[in-house]
């Protein structure tokens, strides 16, 4: 069997962008928050995020997440 090439998509964010994490199961909630600090080089993770519920946390986004640019 041949291997299927996988595409790697670089995640980049800036302060003020929104991090949106899709639900991982049918009735799960979508989480979203504001990127308040970028700690990786050139806009890469990890990000300090203030979630919509007010909590803050350091996040390395997985494949279920995307960045919505501010504006």
Image: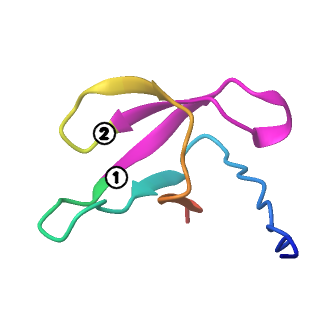
Q: Position of residue 36 (x, y in %)?
A: 51, 32
Q: Position of residue 17 (x, y in %)?
A: 55, 52
Residue in the image at 83% along x and 76% along y: 1
Numbered badge on residue 51 = 2
Residue in the image at 25% along x and 27% along y: 55
Query: Where is the C terminus found, in terms of image quarters?
Result: bottom right
26 or 53: nearer the viewer = 26
Q: Which quadrant holds residue 7?
A: bottom right
Is residue 2 a member of the stretch shown in magenta?
no
Q: CA distance from mark 1 to mark 2?
A: 6 Å
Numbered badge on residue 32 = 1
Residue sitting farthest toward the front: 1
Magenta region, residue range: 32-50
28 on left or right of 5: left
Query: Would you place residue 53 above or below residue 29 in this image?
Result: above
| Label 2: which secondary element | strand
**Number of residues whose C-alpha sits closer than 10 Å to that of mark 2, classed few (under 14), some (14–19) or many (20 or more):** some
38 or 1: nearer the viewer = 1
């Amino acid at each position: 069997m041949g291997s299927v090439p996988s595409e790697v998509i670089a995640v980049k964010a800036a302060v003020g962008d929104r991090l949106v994490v899709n639900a991982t199961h049918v009735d799960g909630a979508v989480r979203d928050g504001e990127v308040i600090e970028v700690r990786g080089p050139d806009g890469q993770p990890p990000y300090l995020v203030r979630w919509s519920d007010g909590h803050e946390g350091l996040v390395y986004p997985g494949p279920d997440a995307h960045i919505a640019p501010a504006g």
